[in-house]
C-alpha cells in the first residue's frame, strides 16, 4: 500500500501564500506528477506531505491514516531534494546507507542494498567520493539511490532532473519510469518541465500560485485543459490564443477573421472568448474550409519539424509544419484550422467552455 | 579541523579585495607607509617588549638607572617565583589554576547552552525572534562595572561571594549571549536541508542536528569557545569585586595585587604578566581568521 492524500493544504510565509487549498489524491502505485512553474508551491507541497513544513490548514493522510502531525521519520517516506541535500562530509556510500543506518540494519544488509542500488544507477565507481567530488548528474543519482535504497510508502521527488543536461535528463526520464514500473511504488514527482510531466506521469496535477488548476491524465490535461493558463503552460510550442466572439454560426476574431463556429460550443453571441489552437492542429500545407489568412513572420526549424510563426493581425499563430517547408517573411499564407480540436475559453475567467457536446 | 563550514555551502564568486590605495602605490609599499607603520609598531609594542625584558632581567638591572635596554644579565628566577614560593607552590600559581578552572568551566557551560540555542534561533520560527535576539544581546550592553554592585548584593544573599562557582556563573551569563550570536551566524551558513534529509532517513530532529549539522559547526564552535575563553581569562572587574581570598582569586586581580605594597617586585609582576598573556596569544593566533567575524558578532565571511 502507498496512498498519499493531501486535503486543503494551506501555508503562508509571511505575506506570501505558498499553498492555497491544495488537494491531491495519489493512488497506490501511481506516478503522480505535480507540474507548475517556479514559485507555484511545488516544493512546499512535497515538504508538507513529508512533514517538514507546519501547515496553516489541511490534512495529510498516508494509507488512509491521518498523519498530519506526525514527525517526518514516522511517515515512512523517502524524498529526493531539489538541491540533493547530500551530506557533505559523508561519502556517496554513506549517503546512500544513511536511511538504513537510521533503521539499524546490519552492515552486511546495508552493503548488499547499497551495492544493488549503485549498480542500478551506475554509480559503483563513485561510492567512495564525497559530494564535492561529484558532478551534478552524479550527485543526482546518489540522491536517487539514497531514496530508493529503502522501500518506503511513497517516494517524493523534487525536480530531480532539473539540474541535468538535456541528454542525461532524457536518459534518466526513461530510467525513472522503468524503476517506477519495476518497483510498483507510489511516486509523487514534482517538475516545472511539461515534457517530463506528459511523458512520465500516470496523473498530473497542474499547480499555479498555490492552487491546483487541473488534475488528470497527461492526455486529459493536454487535450482538455481546464483553463487558458493550463493550455498555455502545457504543450510546446505553446498554444496560440486568439481573441474572438461567437456570432450565429460563425466565430468572429478581434482581428477581423471569421471561422465556422465549432458545433459543440454553447457560448452565447457576443461573449468575449479566446480561441486556443495548438500548433499540430494548424497547417500551412493542407487545404480545408476553415482557414485563417496571415503573413509569414518567421521559421523555427527544429530538425524533425519546423514551427512556422504566422501573423494574423497583431497576433502570432504557431503552426507545425514539415521540416522541408520554406518561405520568406511577409509572404501571404493560408492557415488551415482543425476546429474539432480547437479550445474555447471565456476571456474573462479564463475557464474552458463546456465541451460536453464534443 | 581540516574541514570548515565553507565546504558545506557553495562558494560565492571570488571578489577582488585589493584596496584602491594599494593599487595606486604599485606592488610595494611606499616609504611613508613603512615609516608610519614602524613608528606605530614601536609605540604599540614597546610596553610588551619592556614587560618581556623585565621578566628576564636580574633584579639589579630591573632597578638600574639609567634603564638598561640591551646590556643586562638574563635570569629565569622571576618565572620560578611565579610558580614556587619558599613553602611549596606560590599563591600566584594557585591563582593561575583558579583562572584555568573558572575560564574553562564557564566556557564549556556557555558553549553547551549557547550552541543549541543558536541552532534553535536559526532553524525554528520563534515568536518575536528579532526582539528576543536583541534582548539577549542587550545584556552585553552594560559594562561589568555598572552591574557589579547589584550582582554583589545578590551574590551575598545566595552565598556566592568569594566562590569559584559565583565567578563561573557570571562569566557564563556574559558568554552565553555572545555564543548565541556568533554561533547563529555559523548555523545559518549550514543548509537546513541536511537535517530535513536526515529526518526523512528516519532520524529525529535532535539526532539530525547531532549527527549531521553539529560536525559541520565544529570549526565555528572552536572559534566561539576561544573568544569566550579569552573573555573569562581576562576578566578583571567581577573578579576583584566578587572574590577576596587567595584560594578563589583568579590571576588578573592576583597580579594587580602584586603592585601596591611598600616595595614592588617588578620582575615578578612582569614574569606573571608574561605567563598570563601567553595562553591568550596562543588562542588568538589559532582563531585569527575569525577575529574580525567575532568583532562584528556573527557576521561570518560569505
Ligand atoms: N521558507 C520560505 N520562506 C519564505 N517564503 C518561502 C519559503 N519557502 C517557499 N517560499 C515561497 O513560497 C512560494 C512557493 O515556493 P516553492 O514551494 O518553493 O515553489 P516551487 O517549488 O514551485 O518553485 C514562493 O513564492 C516562495 O518564495
Ligand atoms: Mg521548488
Image (tube, coloured by chain):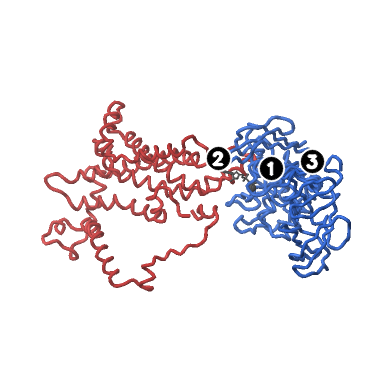
Chain colours: A blue, B red
Residue that carries the numbered disc 3 in the rendered image = A268
Marked residue chain, label 2: A
Q: CA distance from mark 1 to mark 2?
A: 30 Å
On the image, the x and y values in percent for residue B116 come to 48, 39
Snapshot quadrant of residue B285: bottom left
Q: Quadrant of the N terminus of chain A?
A: top right
Q: Secondary structure at mark 3?
A: loop
Residue A194 visible to an observer of this rendering: yes
Snapshot quadrant of residue A302: bottom right
Are both tags, 1 and 2, on one chain?
Answer: yes
Horizontally, is B90 left or right of A299 in the view?
A: left
On the image, the x and y values in percent for residue A357 come to 86, 41
Q: Secondary structure at mark 2?
A: loop
Q: Residue at x 29, y 72 (%)?
A: B31
Q: Earlier in the sequence, mark 3 or mark 1?
A: 1
Q: Could you say which is closer to the camera, residue A172 or residue A100?
A: A172
Mark 1 or mark 2, whichever is nearer to me: 2
Residue A149 visible to an observer of this rendering: no
User: Considering only vertical position in the picture, is B65 above or below A3?
Assistant: below
Q: Could you say which is closer to the camera, residue A88 or residue A333?
A: A333
Q: Please tell me how crowded label 2 is: few (under 14), some (14-19), or many (20+) other residues with Cα within 10 Å.
A: few
User: Considering only vertical position in the picture, is A33 above or below B44?
Assistant: above
Given contact means CB atoms under 8 Å apart, are the residues at marks 1 and 2 in contact?
no
Q: Could you say which is closer to the camera, residue A282 or residue A13?
A: A282
Q: Which mark is residue A15?
A: 2
Marked residue chain, label 3: A
Amino acid at each position: 500500500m502507498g496512498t498519499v492524500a493531501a486535503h486543503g493544504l494551506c501555508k503562508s510565509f509571511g505575506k506570501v501564500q505558498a499553498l492555497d487549498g491544495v488537494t491531491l489524491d495519489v493512488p497506490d502505485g501511481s506516478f503522480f506528477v505535480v507540474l507548475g512553474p517556479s514559485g507555484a508551491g511545488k516544493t512546499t507541497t512535497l515538504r508538507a506531505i513529508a512533514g517538514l513544513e507546519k501547515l496553516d490548514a489541511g490534512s495529510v493522510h498516508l494509507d488512509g491514516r491521518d498523519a498530519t502531525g506526525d514527525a517526518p521519520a514516522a511517515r515512512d517516506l523517502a524524498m529526493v531534494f531539489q538541491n540533493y541535500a547530500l551530506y557533505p562530509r559523508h561519502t556517496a556510500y554513506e549517503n546512500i546507507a544513511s536511511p538504513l543506518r537510521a533503521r539499524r540494519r546490519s552492515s552486511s544488509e546495508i552493503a548488499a542494498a547499497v551495492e544493488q542500488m549503485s549498480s542500478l544507477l551506475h554509480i559503483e565507481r563513485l561510492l567512495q567520493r564525497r559530494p564535492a567530488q561529484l558532478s551534478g548528474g552524479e550527485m543526482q543519482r546518489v540522491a536517487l539511490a539514497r531514496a530508493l535504497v529503502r522501500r518506503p510508502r511513497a517516494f517524493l521527488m523534487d525536480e530531480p532532473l532539473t539540474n541535468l543536461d538535456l541528454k542525461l535528463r532524457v536518459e534518466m526520464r526513461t530510467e525513472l519510469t522503468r524503476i517506477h514500473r519495476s518497483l510498483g511504488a507510489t511516486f509523487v514527482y514534482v517538475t516545472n518541465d511539461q515534457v517530463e510531466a506528459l511523458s512520465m506521469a500516470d496523473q498530473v496535477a497542474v499547480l499555479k500560485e498555490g492552487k491546483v488548476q487541473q488534475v488528470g491524465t497527461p492526455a486529459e490535461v493536454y487535450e482538455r485543459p481546464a483553463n487558458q493558463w493550463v493550455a498555455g503552460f502545457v504543450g510546446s510550442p505553446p498554444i496560440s490564443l486568439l481573441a474572438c466572439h461567437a456570432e450565429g454560426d460563425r466565430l468572429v476574431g478581434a482581428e477581423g477573421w471569421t471561422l465556422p463556429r465549432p458545433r459543440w460550443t454553447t457560448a452565447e453571441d457576443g461573449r468575449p472568448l479566446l480561441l486556443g489552437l495548438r500548433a499540430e492542429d494548424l497547417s500551412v500545407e493542407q487545404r480545408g474550409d476553415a482557414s485563417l489568412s496571415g503573413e509569414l513572420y518567421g521559421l523555427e526549424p527544429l530538425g524533425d519539424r519546423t514551427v512556422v510563426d504566422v501573423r494574423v493581425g497583431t497576433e502570432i499563430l504557431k503552426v507545425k509544419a514539415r521540416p522541408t517547408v520554406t518561405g520568406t517573411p511577409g509572404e501571404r499564407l493560408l492557415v488551415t484550422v482543425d476546429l474539432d480540436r480547437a479550445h474555447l475559453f471565456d476571456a474573462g475567467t479564463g475557464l474552458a467552455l463546456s465541451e460536453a457536446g464534443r | 579541523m581540516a574541514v570548515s563550514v565553507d565546504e558545506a555551502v557553495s562558494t560565492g564568486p571570488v571578489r577582488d579585495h585589493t584596496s584602491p590605495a594599494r593599487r595606486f602605490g604599485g606592488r610595494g609599499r611606499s616609504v611613508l607607509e613603512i615609516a608610519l607603520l614602524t613608528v606605530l609598531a614601536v609605540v604599540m609594542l614597546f610596553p610588551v617588549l619592556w614587560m618581556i625584558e623585565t621578566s628576564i632581567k636580574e633584579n639589579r638591572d630591573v632597578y638600574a638607572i639609567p634603564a638598561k635596554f640591551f646590556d643586562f644579565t638574563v635570569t629565569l628566577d622571576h618565572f620560578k617565583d611565579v610558580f614556587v614560593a619558599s613553602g611549596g607552590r606560590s599563591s600566584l600559581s594557585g591563582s593561575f589554576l583558579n583562572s584555568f578552572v573558572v575560564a574553562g568551566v564557564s566556557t564549556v557551560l556557555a558553549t553547551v547552552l549557547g550552541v543549541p540555542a543558536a541552532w534553535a534561533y536559526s532553524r525554528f520560527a520563534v515568536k518575536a525572534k528579532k526582539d528576543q535576539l536583541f534582548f539577549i544581546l542587550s545584556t552585553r550592553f552594560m559594562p561589568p562595572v555598572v552591574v557589579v554592585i547589584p550582582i554583589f548584593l545578590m551574590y551575598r544573599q545566595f552565598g556566592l561571594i568569594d566562590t569559584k562557582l559565583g565567578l563561573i556563573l557570571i562569566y557564563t551569563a556574559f558568554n552565553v549571549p555572545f555564543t548565541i550570536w556568533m554561533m547563529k551566524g555559523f548555523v545559518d551558513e549550514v543548509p537546513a536541508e541536511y537535517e530535513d534529509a536526515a529526518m526523512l532517513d528516519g532520524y529525529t530532529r535532535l539526532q539530525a542536528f547531532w549527527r549531521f549539522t553539529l560536525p559541520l559547526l565544529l570549526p565555528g564552535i572552536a572559534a566561539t569557545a576561544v573568544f569566550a575563553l579569552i573573555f573569562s581569562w581576562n576578566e578583571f572587574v567581577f573578579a576583584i569585586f566578587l572574590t577576596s581570598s587567595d584560594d578563589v582569586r583568579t590571576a588578573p586581580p592576583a597580579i594587580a595585587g602584586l603592585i601596591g605594597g611598600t616595595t614592588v617586585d617588578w620582575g615578578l609582576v612582569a614574569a606573571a604578566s608574561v605567563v598570563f598573556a601567553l595562553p591568550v596569544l596562543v588562542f588568538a593566533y589559532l582563531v585569527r581568521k575569525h577575529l574580525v567575524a567575532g568583532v562584528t558578532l556573527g557576521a561570518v565571511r560569505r
